Amino acid sequence: MTDTKTVLEEREGRVAVLTINRPDKLNALNQQVRDDMLEILQRLEGDDAVGAVVITGAGEKAFIAGADIGEFEGRSPFDQRHAMRSPRVFDVMSTFPKPVIAMINGFCLGGGCELAMSCDLRVASEKARFGQPEINLGLIPGGGGTQRLPRLVGTGHALRLILTGDMVGAAEAERIGLVEMVVPHDELRAKTLELAAKIAAKSPLTLRVAKEAVRASESLALEDGIRYERDLFCLCFSSEDKQEGVDAFLAKRPAEWKGR
Ligand code: COA
């Protein structure tokens, strides 16, 4: 395990597991965590041994309980704007060229919920609790929550969560589409790593293109998105992995991906 200041990094085969490590502050996102995350993600992007990334929080209580509220004290709007300058970890994760999975082990609030929503998939412990409580601080979500939450759960549920600041449990989060899987707490790591390993075993090149196509649906009109998908689909015909995938299917053998 490699230690940066606030984020622990481990490898499980082709999966990199990043653990936000401020359990005494419920893994609240401060500037150091965001900087460490950006540095690690930049390194993992170029690491061919990594096929997928899992993000979780240290300790038994929290995934991430939001932005570090202590940092808001006494900050001017200019200081805050500087702290929110690009590149932002939320956007880097949603456009990261490898799948990113949130392994949600407890409180998933505010910026933590926004970080989870920036991931490609969310697996939650049945103990996890979700919410956008910024309204109780005289704030609104600032890590993309007003935009990503309605896209995941619809405008009505997004407004309910953002306007009340209420928390919902894992079962309700799954019902409204905020998480894709809920598992028993003691199976969270095994189930998440199983999912991550299955994905990481696919062609890295094709994973990248598939994610790019689906992410494009968040900003393109349907007609433009369909056209973009067609172009990316045809681009896959230039890859060795498309040749290998088709050859392997016809020869009734497992494919051996090269990432080219
Ligand atoms: N920023 C900074 N510190 C935070 C934090 C945050 N978002 N969330 C929790 N902490 C700190 C607490 O201040 C406390 O620190 P202390 O021991 O030095 O006093 C520690 O983490 C443990 O939290 P505590 O509140 O004692 O735990 P709890 O089990 O009683 O309550 C929560 C858990 C999640 C309900 C509560 O911590 C909370 O409401 N956190 C803020 C959530 C939020 O508003 N997030 C959005 C921020 S924009």
Image (spheres, helix red, strand yellow):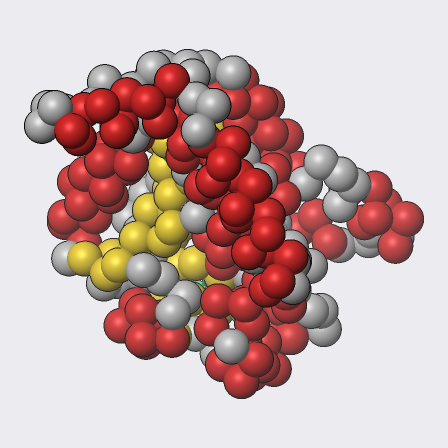
Quadrant into which the C terminus falls: top left
Is residue 113 toward the left or the right of residue 39 in the image?
A: left
Instruction: Looking at the picture, tell me which residue is in the foreground, 63 or 54.
Output: 54
One can see residue 98 in this view: no
User: Image quarter for residue 253?
Assistant: top left
Percent position of residue 200, x then y: 30, 30
Percent position of residue 203, x then y: 34, 26
Residue for point 88% across, 54% down:
77
Residue for point 35% across, 27% down:
242
Please, is residue 194 above or below residue 76 in the view? above
Instruction: Looking at the picture, tell me which residue is in the foreground, 79 or 73.
Output: 79
The residue lying furthest to the left in this view is: 252
User: Image quarter for residue 150?
Assistant: bottom right
Quadrant into which the N terminus falls: top left
- Number of marks in picture: 0
Percent position of residue 196, x then y: 28, 37
The residue lying furthest to the front in this view is: 250
Instruction: Looking at the picture, tell me which residue is in the foreground, 77 or 171.
Output: 171
One can see residue 239 in this view: yes
Percent position of residue 201, x then y: 26, 27
User: Image quarter for residue 47?
Assistant: top left
Residue for point 43% across, 58% down:
108
Please, is residue 26 above or below residue 247 in the view? below
Residue for point 57% across, 80% down:
155
Is residue 172 toward the left or the right of residue 155 in the image?
A: left
Please, is residue 101 above or below residue 148 in the view? above
